[in-house]
Image (spheres, grey):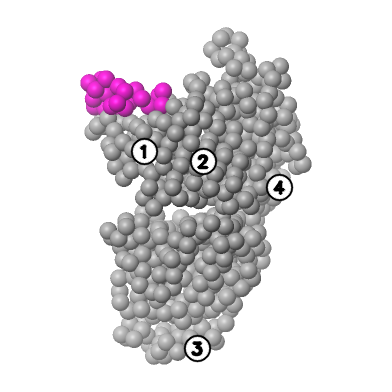
C-alpha cells in the first residue's frame, strides 16, 4: 500500500489489492503449458512474485477465459509504443477513480513529501526470467541518468527539485529510497504517466553494452557493426522501455513485442512472468497475443467499420460515429462512447510571442482575445458536429474536477457578436477594407491565419464554422495545415499567429496535481512558447515573461511547489484558474467530446462508459486490458 504523511497525497484514496498467492491456487495459462512441460519455462509458482498484484474483478467486470488475439490498427510503426501505454505496468498506476495505487511496487511510503521508499514485490522477474530488483534502479540512477555520455543533460527534470538531485539509498534487494531536502510533488505522478518516468532498467541486459561493464574493444566492434558512433549511441538505441522497438529488451508489460520496426504488423506475446493475477489465481493477461497492424490513418475508421479490429480508438473521431453505428450488426462490434477528459477537445492558441510587433500587440490585448472568443458560436459547433453531446466551454477544468467552478467554464465564452464588435471598435479597429475586413492600426487587413497539424478533418470543419462567425465581426480566417514537426517549429519560432490543438491534457486535476500546464514554464505551450523556453532553459534562450499576468502565474507556480497543505494548493489553483478565465489566454471551443470506442462483441470487460484520456489514464491502460478476454461464440 502507499503509506504517506504527505499532504499532497492525503486526498488520494489508496486502494490496496495485494495478496500472497499459494502455489496451489495459481492457474497456468494454456498457451504456456507446453513450454512448462518441456522445461523451457519454470512452473507458474516460480514465475509470478510471491506477492503478486491481485486484480479483483467485480461489478461490470468478471474473471475471464484464456486465449485469442486482440487486433488493433496503428497509423505508423512508432505507435508500437501504445503496447506500453495500454499494458500500463507502472510502479504506481491510476485507478478509474484517478486514485494512485501500487502496481509494480508492493507499496510506497512517503514522508513529508520529500522521501519516497519503494518496496518491490519479492520474486518479481523480467520477461526473460531474470530477477527484477533494486539493482535495476541503481543501474539506471548511477550508470544511465548520471552518466554524461548517456544522459548529457543529466537526470530527468522530475527528479530535480530546484536543481537538487535526490539521494538514492539501496536499502536491500527489494527496497530503495529517494530523498530530497524539499518536497517533490512531481515524482509519483511521473511514475504513473502513460509515458512513464522509468527510474529502472534491465541492468543484466544493458550492462553488456555499457563501457563500465563491457570489454572496451568488443563494445567498440559491436557499435561499429550496428553503425553507431559510440558505445553510448549503441546503448541508448537499445534502451527504449517506452518506445518498445527493441524486442530483445526485457519488459515488465503484460505483452512482449516480438517484432523489430520498421514493420507493417507487430506481434506481441504474453509475458510469462507478468506480476498480476486475478482473484481465482489466473495469471494475467487473459489474451495471448496483441496484433498491431499499420494502416493509413485515413483508412482506419473504414477498416474498423469493416470488422478488421477487436478494439480501436486511435484515428477514430466523433465524426465517424454514425458510419460505425451503421455497420455494427453487419460486422459484429459495438461502438461505445467514452467522455474525453481534456480541458478542451479543441482550442485556439493566439501566440503571445509572435515576432510581428503589430500582431503581438493585438494578441496581448485582452480585449482582442475576448472578442475572438465571444465571436464563436460554440453551441452551433456542438450541434453541427457533435450532436449536442459536447459542452460549449473554455479551456479549463471539467465538472468532474474538485477545482471546477461554473464561471471558469463560461467566462467570455457565450456567443455575443455585438459585444465582440464593440470590443474591436474600442481597441480602435474601426477601419475596414472593401470586403468588410477590419484593418490593423498599420493598415493591414485583419487576416488571422490559424495553423493546424493537418492530421484530421475535424479541425478543418470546426474552423470553417468559426470562419463564418469571425467574418460577421470583420475578421477574416485562413487555415494553414502542415506536418506536426513543422507546425510546432513554426509556433516555437514565433511565426504562427494562431494554432489549433487540444486543450489541457488533464481536465480533471486535484489541487495536488501540478498546475504547470496553465503557467508559462513549457515551450510546448502554444500560447507562450518563448516564455516557456525561457523557463526551461534557465533564461539561456526564449523570452522572459513581461506581462503582469504571466509574471503572476510564474509566482503562483512556485508558490504551489512550496505549499505545505492541500488547502494552500487549492487556493493557488483557484487563483490560476481565475486568471485564465478572465484573460482568455487560450480560446476553448468545446469540451468533453465523446470518443468512439470500437469493441468486438465477444471482447469482455471493456467498460461501457469510461474516461478517454492520455494522462492521467493511458487511454485504455487505466482499465487494464490485461483483464479483457474473449467470450466464446
Question: Viewer-nearest of labels 2 and 4?
Answer: 2
Q: Do the residues labelled 3 and 1 touch (CB within 8 Å)?
A: no
Q: Tell me if mark 3 has few (under 14), some (14-19) or many (20+) residues whose alpha carbon lies within 10 angstroms of its own.
A: some
Work out how far the residue at label 3 is from the one at label 1, CA to CA, in angstroms. Answer: 56 Å
Residue 385: image location, x then y, percent: 60, 64
CB within 8 Å, label 3 to label 2: no
Is residue 157 in the magenta section?
Answer: no
Nearer-N-terminus badge (4/3)? 3
Residue drawn 31% across the image and 36% down it: 147
Q: What's the distance in space between the residues labelled 1 and 4, CA to CA?
A: 42 Å
Q: Distance between the residues labelled 3 and 2?
A: 55 Å
**Tags 1 and 2 in contact by the CB under 8 Å rule?**
no
Query: Residue 318: which quarter of the image?
Result: bottom right
Name the mark nearer the viewer: 1 or 2. Answer: 2
In the picture, the disc for residue 145 is 1
Residue on which disc 2 sits: 116
Classify mark 2: helix, strand or loop.
strand
Q: What residue is drawn where x is 53% and y is 24%?
A: 125
Q: Distance between the residues labelled 1 and 2?
A: 18 Å
The stretch drawn in magenta includes residue 213: yes
What number is the disc on residue 422? 3
Q: What element carries label 4?
A: loop
Mark 3 or 2, nearer chain start: 2
Residue 605 higher or lower than 450, as above or below: above
> Is residue 405 positioned above or below 294 on the image?
below
| Prevalent SS, magenta region | helix
Where residue 83 appears, as percent x and y from the top left, is 52, 37
Decide which of tag 1 and tag 4 comes sooner along the chain. Answer: 1
- Marks 3, 1: nearer the viewer: 1
Amino acid at each position: 500500500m502507499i503509506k504517506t504523511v504527505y499532504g499532497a497525497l492525503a486526498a488520494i484514496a489508496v486502494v490496496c489489492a495485494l495478496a500472497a498467492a499459494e502455489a496451489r491456487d495459481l492457474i497456468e495459462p494454456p498457451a504456456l503449458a507446453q513450454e512448462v512441460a518441456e522445461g523451457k519455462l519454470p512452473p507458474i509458482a516460480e514465475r509470478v512474485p510471491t506477492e503478486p498484484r491481485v486484480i479483483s474483478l467485480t461489478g461490470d467486470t468478471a474473471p475471464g477465459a484464456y486465449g485469442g488475439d486482440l487486433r488493433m490498427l496503428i497509423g505508423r510503426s512508432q505507435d508500437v509504443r501504445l503496447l506500453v501505454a495500454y499494458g500500463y505496468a507502472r510502479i504506481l498506476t491510476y485507478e478509474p477513480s484517478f486514485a494512485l495505487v501500487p502496481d509494480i511496487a508492493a507499496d510506497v511510503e512517503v514522508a513529508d513529501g520529500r522521501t519516497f521508499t519503494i518496496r518491490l514485490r519479492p520474486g518479481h522477474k523480467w520477461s526473460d526470467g531474470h530477477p527484477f530488483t533494486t539493482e535495476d534502479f541503481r543501474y539506471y540512477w548511477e550508470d544511465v541518468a548520471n552518466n554524461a555520455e548517456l544522459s548529457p543533460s543529466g537526470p530527468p527534470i522530475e527528479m530535480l527539485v530546484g536543481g537538487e538531485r535526490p539521494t538514492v539509498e539501496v536499502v536491500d534487494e527489494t527496497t530503495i529510497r529517494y530523498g530530497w531536502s524539499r518536497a517533490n510533488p512531481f515524482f509519483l505522478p511521473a511514475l504513473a504517466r502513460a509515458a512513464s518516468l522509468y527510474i529502472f532498467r534491465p541492468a543484466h541486459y544493458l550492462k553488456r553494452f555499457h563501457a563500465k561493464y563491457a570489454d572496451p574493444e568488443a563494445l567498440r566492434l559491436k557499435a561499429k557493426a550496428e553503425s553507431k558512433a559510440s558505445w553510448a549511441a549503441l546503448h541508448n538505441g537499445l534502451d527504449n522501455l517506452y518506445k518498445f522497438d527493441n524486442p530483445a529488451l526485457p519488459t515488465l508489460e503484460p505483452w512482449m513485442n516480438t517484432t523489430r520496426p520498421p514493420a507493417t504488423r507487430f506481434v506481441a506475446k504474453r509475458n510469462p512472468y507478468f506480476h498480476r493475477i486475478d482473484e481465482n489465481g489466473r495469471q494475467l493477461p487473459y489474451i495471448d497475443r496483441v496484433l498491431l497492424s499499420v494502416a493509413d490513418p485515413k483508412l482506419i475508421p473504414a477498416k474498423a467499420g469493416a470488422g478488421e479490429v477487436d478494439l480501436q480508438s486511435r484515428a477514430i473521431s466523433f465524426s465517424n460515429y454514425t458510419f460505425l453505428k451503421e455497420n455494427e450488426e453487419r460486422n459484429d462490434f459495438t461502438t461505445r462512447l467514452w467522455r474525453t477528459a481534456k480541458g478542451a477537445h479543441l482550442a485556439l492558441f493566439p501566440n503571445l510571442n509572435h515576432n510581428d510587433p503589430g500582431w503581438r500587440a493585438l494578441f496581448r490585448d485582452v480585449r482582442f482575445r475576448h472578442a475572438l472568443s465571444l465571436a464563436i458560436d460554440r453551441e452551433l459547433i456542438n450541434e453541427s458536429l457533435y450532436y449536442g453531446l459536447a459542452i460549449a466551454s473554455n479551456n479549463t477544468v471539467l465538472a468532474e474536477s474538485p477545482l471546477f467552478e461554473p464561471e471558469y467554464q463560461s467566462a467570455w465564452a457565450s456567443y455575443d457578436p455585438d459585444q465582440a464588435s464593440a470590443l474591436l471598435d474600442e481597441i480602435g479597429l474601426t477601419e475596414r477594407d472593401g470586403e468588410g475586413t477590419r484593418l490593423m492600426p498599420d493598415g493591414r487587413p485583419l487576416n488571422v491565419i490559424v495553423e493546424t497539424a493537418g492530421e484530421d478533418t475535424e479541425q478543418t470543419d470546426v474552423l470553417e464554422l468559426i470562419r463564418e462567425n469571425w467574418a460577421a465581426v470583420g475578421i477574416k480566417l485562413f487555415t494553414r495545415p502542415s506536418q506536426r514537426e513543422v507546425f510546432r517549429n513554426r509556433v516555437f519560432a514565433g511565426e504562427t499567429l494562431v494554432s489549433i490543438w487540444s486543450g489541457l491534457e488533464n481536465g480533471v486535476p486535484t489541487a495536488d496535481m501540478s498546475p504547470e500546464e496553465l503557467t508559462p514554464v513549457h515551450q510546448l505551450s502554444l500560447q507562450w512558447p518563448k516564455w516557456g523556453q525561457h523557463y526551461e532553459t534557465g533564461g539561456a534562450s526564449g523570452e522572459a515573461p513581461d506581462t503582469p499576468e504571466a509574471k503572476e502565474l510564474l509566482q503562483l507556480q512556485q508558490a504551489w511547489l512550496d505549499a505545505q497543505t492541500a488547502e494552500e494548493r487549492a487556493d493557488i489553483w483557484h487563483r490560476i484558474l481565475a486568471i485564465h478565465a478572465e484573460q482568455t489566454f487560450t480560446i476553448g471551443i468545446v469540451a468533453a467530446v465523446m470518443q468512439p470506442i470500437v469493441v468486438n462483441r465477444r471482447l469482455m470487460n471493456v467498460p461501457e462508459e469510461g474516461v478517454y484520456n492520455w494522462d492521467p489514464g493511458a487511454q485504455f491502460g487505466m482499465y487494464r486490458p490485461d483483464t479483457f478476454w474473449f467470450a466464446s461464440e
